[in-house]
Image (spheres, helix red, strand yellow):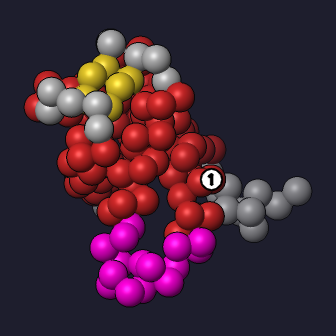
């Protein structure tokens, strides 16, 4: 099998992508812990709960968010994309509804938390991209 045709041209690439994913997961969990300190309406029982919550939020964003975006496309277009913030807040709140160690008191707290979580996610992605990008000699 030709691994370079599948995009797996070097074993170090697998390692790099795996490490990048682990770092993102841990940093996202730390972001949730920080949000719990900043917003009294968000609580996280510990780092283990934050890891699970970050994983569940990631799964919701991967599988549920695209469906919601398509179903609410007319409202999203009418609101010039602002309804996407509501979708993000709903998914943040839904994650707290299915987990015991991660709680969000209200939709307002979910909206603020999801906004800050998304901003930190962009910063984390940018930092990790720079960290894990191979440098040319």
Rendered view: 59 above or below 80: above
Residue in the picture at 55% in, 46% down? 60
Residue in the picture at 42% in, 59% down? 87
Per the image, the residue denoted by label 1 is 63
Horizontal side of 102 relative to 131 (left or right) equals right
- Mark 1 burial class by Cα count in 10 Å: few <14, some 14-19, many 20+: few
**Where in the figure is residue 44, as x and y percent of width and height?**
31, 20
Horizontal side of 1 relative to 23 (left or right) equals right
Q: Main secondary structure of the magenta part?
A: helix
> Quarter holding the C terminus?
bottom left
Q: Which residue is at the far left?
A: 38
Horizontal side of 65 relative to 42 (left or right) equals right
Residue 83 magenta-drawn? yes
Q: Which residues are magenta?
A: 70-84
Rendered view: 122 above or below 50: below
Rendered view: 135 above or below 112: below
For mark 1, give the secondary structure.
Answer: helix
Q: Which residue is at the far front?
A: 106
How many numbered marks does the figure carry?
1
Towards the viewer: 131 or 101: 101
- The answer, for residue 59, to whether it is visible in the render is yes
């Amino acid at each position: 099998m030709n691994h370079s045709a599948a995009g797996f041209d070097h074993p170090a690439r697998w390692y790099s992508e795996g490490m990048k994913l682990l770092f993102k997961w841990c940093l996202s969990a730390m972001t949730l812990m920080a949000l719990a300190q900043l917003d009294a309406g968000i609580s996280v029982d510990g780092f283990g709960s934050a890891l699970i919550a970050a994983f569940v939020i990631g799964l919701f964003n991967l599988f549920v968010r695209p469906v919601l975006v398509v179903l609410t496309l007319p409202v999203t277009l009418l609101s010039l994309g602002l309804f996407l913030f509501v979708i993000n807040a709903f998914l943040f709140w839904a994650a707290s509804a299915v987990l015991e160690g991660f709680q969000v008191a209200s939709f307002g707290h979910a909206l603020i938390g999801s906004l800050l979580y998304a901003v930190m996610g962009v910063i984390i992605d940018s930092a990790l991209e720079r960290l894990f990008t191979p440098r040319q000699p």
